[in-house]
Image (spheres, rainbow, N blue to C red):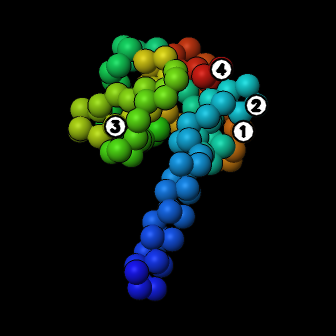
Amino acid sequence: MNRFSLAAITLTAGLLVTLAHAEPAVKMAGGMLVNTSGMTLYTFDMDAAGKSKCNGPCAALWPPAMAAADAKPEGELSLVTRDDGTQQWAYKGKPVYTYAADKQAGDVTGDNFKNVWHIVK
């Protein structure tokens, strides 16, 4: 085995260890569900389990918690396919979103917005 092969094996092993310990895209923190940036996640009462009804202007104000194409469900976190074919995280089957007016981690200005948007606890 030459040193280039050994370097490639070492790099691959390191990458696999990093991926195996990657932080989940959505997690519980401070008693509520947040994304990796610590931004609060919300559900929308008009969504049905497994289906987002927040598209277009709604999605501009309430950005979906998007999932990578290779994301895998885990525990109470699942994935829903949006109308445009992309994937969004869901909690207990309900799609989750951030709120554009929340400016920093821990903001909860969207809670009970119009009585249809709620923090995920």
- Residue at mark 3 to residue at mark 2: CA–CA distance: 26 Å
Q: Most extreme residue toward the right, as rendered?
A: 30
In the rendered structure, which disc, 3 or 2, sits on the residue that comes first in sequence? 2
In the rendered structure, which disc, 2 or 4, sits on the residue that comes first in sequence? 2
- In this figure, which residue is indicated by the disc labeled 2? 30
Q: Most extreme residue toward the front, as rendered?
A: 1
Relative to 1, residue 45 above or below = above
Depth check, front residue: 120 or 70: 70
Q: Most extreme residue toward the left, as rendered?
A: 84
For label 2, the SS is: loop
- In this figure, which residue is indicated by the disc labeled 4? 121
Circles 1 and 2: CB distance less than 8 Å?
yes
Looking at the image, residue 57 sits to the left or right of residue 36; the answer is: left
**What percent of the width, then of the height, locates residue 29?**
71, 33
Q: Which mark is residue 87?
A: 3
Residue visible at 73% across and 25% down in the picture: 31
**Quarter of the picture holding the C terminus:** top right
In the rendered structure, which disc, 3 or 4, sits on the residue that comes first in sequence? 3
- Residue at mark 2 to residue at mark 4: CA–CA distance: 9 Å
Residue visible at 34% across and 37% down in the picture: 87
Q: Quadrant of residue 73?
A: top left
**What percent of the width, then of the height, locates residue 9?**
45, 70
Disc 2 residue type (three-letter)? Gly
- In this figure, which residue is indicated by the disc labeled 1? 106
Of tags 4 and 1, the one toward the viewer is: 4
Label 3: how many Cα within 10 Å (few below 14, some 14–19, many 20+): many
**What percent of the width, then of the height, locates residue 11?**
49, 71
For label 1, the SS is: loop
